[in-house]
């Protein structure tokens, strides 16, 4: 049957027009959905953060996009690239230029013949002496926490005894299994856990936090339908929560803190909670400023909404549980708070255990099961592990146990009293120094402070570094912090004197340190687009593994 050409042409045009019309409708519909998504996001931000902060977020986003366009121009891009490469080069050179009296040669491949014991010990001793920070004299912020020789000695002995052990093989090392279980039990008792509570050891605070996020994510998925899981934290919460959310594809919702107290805004947390929220977080204490959030209010929010509540006590560790017995009155923050479902505690901080030791605790075994990984179909056999690692160093676990039982409850109470009193002494001195002010309301071992113009707080960092102090640099707001340890208790007067001398030096010579930390951190705070700073950070990590 012959079809008329006009009819065929009409049919083709008809089909095409219908297709185009539908395509246009689809585009319009998708555009409308995108518009609704933007409106919803703006509305939610206004609801959670308020109008002023929401407008500030929009302004920052516009700044970032504008700077992104600007830095794409060849001239600006080259200038940024040159500055980034110079910063990375300076970092690498700083690592490779050995400080101290070590004259050992680098070993970039296995020696043809093995070293004898004396040669090995000589190299290790020489490299142990490199560096110019007198941390034994109390001039470091945190980092090394145990300054008690008797504890170090028994811990080292325990590590030597269990040097080849691995908890992955409990049948081979049943005593190690018992030791690990006792560490968890003792830590649970410290935090007033109920009989149903349980936990596991981990390699540190970051792993403890990552495990808690995994456990609460899996638990929430079992309990209800989760479309887009989110986690709510204060802006001051540890960055390990950011890492966990990146690993697991969780939306991270950050809530501002009160500029005066440093505690998270409870009402903003309440407004941010929705059906996809798996967990909220409070710190006891937070890393930047040593402030404890209102754990009781957060616990009530978690309980009333049927979601998880993690208390990050990694830094507070073996100080916070003993504060009251040491004579310092603080609000309740542990498992006695209704709604708290998990607590992380670093035994390798103020518990004085070897580095690489932490405990994550849960209110019940259902949550702990949600942390585990189990595979029943592997040709190598049924495989189950409690945390990220498979093989784990039993020596660290043994060293942790030895440190805890060597210190005992009274030992930790005395240590808490000395360290917290040291922080109070330093805080009172800072409060009397013209041009400085304390950030937030510190409650335990950490003191954070900033400066009023014309004093640049990062210039103080460099001035203190020249005096062999290693302080932690903060941003948003710019500041410095000192985490007091047993070492600091003997160096508090020296810190106060050196800090005042640094201020006087900067006042007399305001341009002396403008090219040091002031330039780097000033740029980090001021730049709307953090890509150049991220590149420097990547270069820093690369430099850690550099040999030339």
Image (cartoon, rainbow, N blue to C red):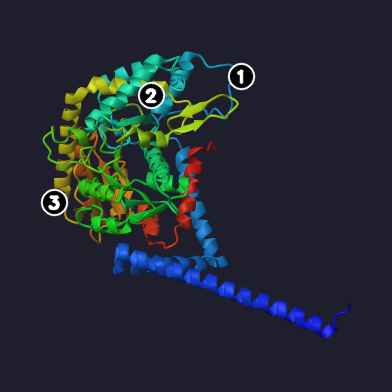
> Height in image: 501 above or below 361?
below
Which label number is shown at residue 112? Answer: 1
Q: Secondary structure at mark 1?
A: loop
Question: For mark 2, does the 10 Å Cα neighbourhood hold few (<14), some (14 to 19), or many (20 or more) residues?
Answer: many
Query: Which quadrant of the structure image shows residue 399?
Result: top left
Name the N-terminal-most of marks 3 and 2. 2
Q: Is residue 114 left or right of residue 437?
A: right
- Residue of label 3: 432
Q: Residue furthest front?
A: 1
Q: CA distance from mark 3 to mark 2?
A: 43 Å
* Residue at 42% from the left image edge and 25% from the top image edge: 126
- Residue of label 2: 396
Q: Is residue 304 left or right of residue 130?
A: left
* Residue at 17% from the left image edge and 49% from the top image edge: 430
- From where the camera sits, is residue 370 visible? yes
Q: Secondary structure at mark 3?
A: loop
| Place of residue 183 in the rendered image (x, y in percent of width and height, measured from the top left) | 31, 24
For the N terminus, the quadrant is bottom right
């Amino acid at each position: 049957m012959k079809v008329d050409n006009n009819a065929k042409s009409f049919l083709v045009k008809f089909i095409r027009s219908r297709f185009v019309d539908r395509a246009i409708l689809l585009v319009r519909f998708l555009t409308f959905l995108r518009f609704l998504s933007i409106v919803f996001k703006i509305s939610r931000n206004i609801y959670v953060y308020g109008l002023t902060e929401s407008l500030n977020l929009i302004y920052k986003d516009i700044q970032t996009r504008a700077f992104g366009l600007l830095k794409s121009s060849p001239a600006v891009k080259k200038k940024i690239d040159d500055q980034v490469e110079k910063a990375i080069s300076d970092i690498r050179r700083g690592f490779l230029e050995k400080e101290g009296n070590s004259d050992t040669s680098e070993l970039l491949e296995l020696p043809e013949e093995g070293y004898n014991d004396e040669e090995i010990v000589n190299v290790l001793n020489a490299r142990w002496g490199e560096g110019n920070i007198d941390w034994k004299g109390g001039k470091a912020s945190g980092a090394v926490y145990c300054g008690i020789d008797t504890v170090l000695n028994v811990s080292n002995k325990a590590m030597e005894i269990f040097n080849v052990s691995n908890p992955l093989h409990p049948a081979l090392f049943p005593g190690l299994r018992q030791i690990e279980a006792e560490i968890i039990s003792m830590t649970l008792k410290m935090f007033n856990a109920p009989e149903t509570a349980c936990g596991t050891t981990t390699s540190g605070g970051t792993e403890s936090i990552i495990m808690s996020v995994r456990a609460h994510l899996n638990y929430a998925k079992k309990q209800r339908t989760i479309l887009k899981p989110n986690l709510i934290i204060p802006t001051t919460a540890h960055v390990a929560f950011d890492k966990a959310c990146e690993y697991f594809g969780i939306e991270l919702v950050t809530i501002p803190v009160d500029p005066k107290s440093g505690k998270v805004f409870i009402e903003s947390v309440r407004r941010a909670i929705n059906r996809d929220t798996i967990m909220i977080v409070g710190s006891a204490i937070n890393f930047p400023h040593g402030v404890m959030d209102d754990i009781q209010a957060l616990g009530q929010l978690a309980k009333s909404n049927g979601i998880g509540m993690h208390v990050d006590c990694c830094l507070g560790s073996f100080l916070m549980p003993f504060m009251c017995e040491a004579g310092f009155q603080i609000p309740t923050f542990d498992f006695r708070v209704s709604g708290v479902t998990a607590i992380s505690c670093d035994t390798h901080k103020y518990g004085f255990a070897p580095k690489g030791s932490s405990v994550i605790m849960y209110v019940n075994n259902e949550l702990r099961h949600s942390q585990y990984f189990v595979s029943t179909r592997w040709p190598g056999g049924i495989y189950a592990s409690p945390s990220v690692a498979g093989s784990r160093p039993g020596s660290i676990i043994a060293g942790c146990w030895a440190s805890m039982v060597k210190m005992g409850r009274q030992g930790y109470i005395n240590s808490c009293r000395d360290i917290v009193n040291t922080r109070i002494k330093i805080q009172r001195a800072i409060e009397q120094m013209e041009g400085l002010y304390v950030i937030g309301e510190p409650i335990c071992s950490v003191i954070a402070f900033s400066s009023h113009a014309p004093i640049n707080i990062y210039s103080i960092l460099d001035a203190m570094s020249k005096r062999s102090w290693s302080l932690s640099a903060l941003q948003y707001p710019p500041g410095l912090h000192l985490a007091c340890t047993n070492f600091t208790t003997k160096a508090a007067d020296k810190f106060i004197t050196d800090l005042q001398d640094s201020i006087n030096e900067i006042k007399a010579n305001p341009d002396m340190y403008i090219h040091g930390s002031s330039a780097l951190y000033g740029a980090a705070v001021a730049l709307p687009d953090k890509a150049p700073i991220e590149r420097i950070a990547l270069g820093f990590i690369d430099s850690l593994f550099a040999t030339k």
